[in-house]
Amino acid sequence: MIVDTASGYAALTRMSASTGVMSAEYKVNFLSPAEGEKLIARGRIIKPGRTLTVCYGEVHAQKDGIEKLVATMIAREKTGLAD
């Protein structure tokens, strides 16, 4: 769920303040257990669009200051939704 949020916020960076986004489709790959003190999720836009934006996300587990990749996601975010 944290990676879906990161992806959605990445898509929001291309929108005006009065619009929103919603996940239209996504695929998550769980790579290893999320063990550590905290989780770090990062999202970025791969291809912006007028109604759908393709995004990529990663989740890293941080333990003793070292990050380990634990999940990846590719998503299509429906953009331009009114609040």
Image (cartoon, grey):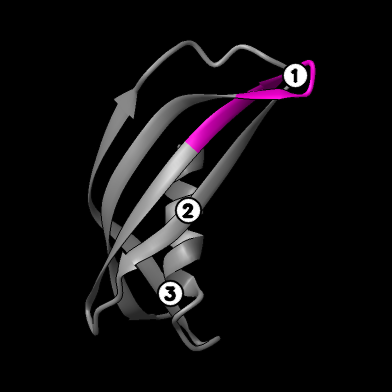
Query: Residue sitting at 42 percent across and 46 percent down?
Result: 57
Question: First in sequence: mark 3 or mark 2?
Answer: 3
- Which three-letter amino acid code belongs to the residue tagged 2? Gly
Density class for disc 1 (Cα within 10 Å; few <14, some 14-19, many ≥20) is few
- Which three-letter amino acid code belongs to the residue tagged 3? Gly
- Judging depth in this view, the residue of 5 and 31 nearest the camera is 31
**Residue 6 image position (x, y, % from top left):** 50, 51
Between label 3 and label 2, give the one nearer the viewer. 2
Residue 22, relative to residue 63: is it above or below? below
3D distance between C-alphas at marks 2 and 1: 20 Å
Question: First in sequence: mark 3 or mark 1?
Answer: 3
- Judging depth in this view, the residue of 76 and 68 nearest the camera is 68
Q: Quadrant of the C terminus?
A: bottom left
Which residue in the structure is indicated by mark 1? 37
Which residue in the structure is indicated by mark 2? 43
Would you say 81 lies left or right of 5 here? left
Which residue in the structure is indicated by mark 3? 20
- Label 1 sits on a secondary structure element that is loop
Identify the residue at the far right of this view. 64
The magenta segment: 59-67
Query: Residue sitting at 38 percent across and 69 percent down?
Result: 21
**Residue 70 image position (x, y, % from top left):** 47, 23
Would you say 38 lies left or right of 11 here? right
